[in-house]
Amino acid sequence: MSFRRIEKKLISGKRLSPQDAVELYRSDDIFGLGLLADARARELNGDRVYFVRNRHINPTNICINRCRFCAFSRSRGEDGAYEMTMDDIMRRASECGPDTRELHIVGGLHPDWPFSFYTDMLGGIKSRFPHLHIKAFTAVEIDYLTKLSGLGLRKTINALIDAGLGSMPGGGAEILGQGVRRKICPEKVSGARWIEVMRAAHKAGLKTNATMLYGHVEKIEDRVDHMLKLRELQDETGGFNAFIPLAYQPENTRMDGGSRTSAFDDLKTIAVARLFLDNFPHIKAYWVMLGVKIAQIALSFGADDMDGTVIEEKIAHMAGGSSPEAMEIGALADLIRRAGKTPVERNAVYNPVERKRSTTTATDSRAYE
Amino acid sequence: MSKPVTETGRITRKDALSLLKNAPLLELGRMADDVRKKLHRGKTVTFVIDRNINYTNICINRCRFCAYFRDAGHPESYLLSREAIFEKIAETVALGGTQILLQGGLHPDLNIEYFENLFSAIKSRFDVNLHALSAPEIFYIAKQSGLSVPKTLARLKAAGLGSIPGAGAEILSDRVREAISPNKIKTAQWLGVMEAAHRQGIRSTATMMFGSGEEPDDIIAHLDAIRKLQDKTGGFTAFIPWTFQPSNTDIDIRPATGADYLRVLALSRVYLDNIANIQASWVTQGIKMAELSLRFGANDLGSTMIEENVVAAAGVSYRVSMEELVEAAHNAGFRAAQRDTFYKIIKRF
């Protein structure tokens, strides 16, 4: 199937319709699709591909939601349930070297922790490690924290910002359409509420990401509808940094059957997102979910960000994700270069990091030749 | 930039080098996909059910890139008994297997009689193709037995050798061979064994192991050597590029990435216009990359490899089932089919 019509539309600067996005998804011309998306990525970001030195902290997997697709969550007292103490969290933050730019903190909706636990955590980290940018709490957690604080959405977000919150990740979006949510995560906030929280965060001045969990029960049309909702909010607020498609990992979840996503589905999703989400500055190939090899190939299909070193990620790995647990910075930069792109280290909000030569190791400097 | 091979005839070495170095991944992929479509008009992707049996890990070559070999007398060295080999073959046949990939180290105590006896014993017991002994093994057996290579091949064929795996080729560039496997036979000898085999009607595959420190020139030299020999003999059934796995070896190098793999795979399809089949290497790349390979020049998923030891020793342990191979073919838009060693379809899925 040819998409000359869509190509013409893109060349003349017209926006793709949801029908166009579905048509691109259905095409088997992966080369044409990839080249279109790559051209668009180059318009926006040149040949730059971003990465960040980051560390994940998942303070607890105890969660009142128990979404069916999730292999991470546990109920209190269940085998494998854990909760970190404040000291555990501070110790992990203290393990970050001076070059770490971002702490990524997301976890379950813990039934007992008070709102003050979260503000204390943010404040404690910022007072001891002021160089760390804290990217924390999905929209689902923010909704929950709003209930804990009793302050309402806007004031809750402001209290978190005052305590040290720097930006928000994009998790919990899954598929925003309610029909799909009812099947895979009936306890979770609605798609409309997810959007509402993000709108409030953007209006409070926070940058956020947006994810999409795909490859389970949803149809292509559900994915495009999801992206449309994100595009509309981005038109309104401009608060999204990156769109991050997350391939569903079928192992260890409580959903029946299901299979891994195909490589073609992964790459088409990246490419369609790059073309359809014309107002998103960045599309992320999250190697933890895609696997390192497919994430690298995604850099030819419109992705311009590979996330980062991702030390101690638990959520995807508990779902049977087979990617390594962390990636050395030189290896990450090497992958980007061998994909024909230029590696650029960024901070949490996509500003390039000024590098001090004296602090780079031999491996690092090789990566920047 | 060169034009697609199918419009202008053969791609030259110069153009191939330029493509390998400069062409965007997706341009190269599209070119390879077009060549694959012309050569394989049906929407079929094939695989073979087989087992890798490594009869010994004792090897005098001691290649620097190899994590599998042991010296004789080492506590982990072994030589499989005939009974152990028969049992593995019986299991393979029970699983629908049609091929035994029998390879091992260069064991100083095994001469041609050992292999003749083993092969005829296998053939008298099992209806299975013996895809056995890489070119370095054949060369070594000839030397140890005081025979010429053609005479050795003739005797092995008479005993039941059906076809020859393309292993031991590594990179057919003596500069690189000297660096990574100084004791292994050189390019001319590897090609000489293959030519002698093809002339006796013994068909073979050809492999290329890249990512061990070679230059793009070396890759092109390898492809060109294979293409030239194929012009002479037509004996290669398939070409299999795969990537060097550095763990547990003597070579400290960052492994070839997925993009490197797809580039070389695609270029192989474009360059080797006289070899019908290109195999994807799920063993070194994983099943998702193998699936993607089917649009970057590959038309075959290799084998189920019921048992694979050598790559696993170098730290890579992908395992797939037949169902996963069928799924990979479907995901890429093809129908899967089980084939025999010579690419005859046995069963469609």
Image (cartoon, rainbow, N blue to C red):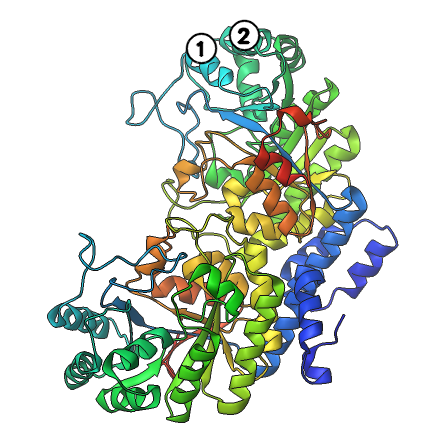
Label 2 belongs to which residue?
Answer: A124
Q: Quick check: do tags 2 and 1 share a chain?
A: yes
Instruction: Report the quarter where the C terminus of chain B lies.
Output: bottom left
Chain of the residue that carries numbered disc 1 in the rendered image: A
The kind of residue on which mark 1 rests is Met
Residue A230 position, x and y percent, is 69, 37
* Quarter of the image with the N terminus of chain B in it: bottom right
Q: Quadrant of residue A98?
A: top right
Residue B17 vertical position relative to residue B12 in the rendered view, above or below: above
Above or below, A207 against A230 in this view is above
Mark 2 or mark 1, which has the lower sequence index? 1
Give x and y (percent) for residue A2: 73, 68
Q: Amino acid at mark 2?
A: Gly
Q: Residue furthest left?
A: B83
Horizontal relation, residue B268 to residue A80: left or right: right
> For this rendering, which residue is in front, B283 or B72?
B72
Q: Chain letter for mark 2, please.
A: A
Kindly tell me whether residue A220 is visible in this rendering: no
Circle 1 residue: A86
Instruction: Find out whether the residues at labels 2 and 1 contact each other: C-beta distance under 8 Å.
Output: yes
Q: Secondary structure at mark 2?
A: helix
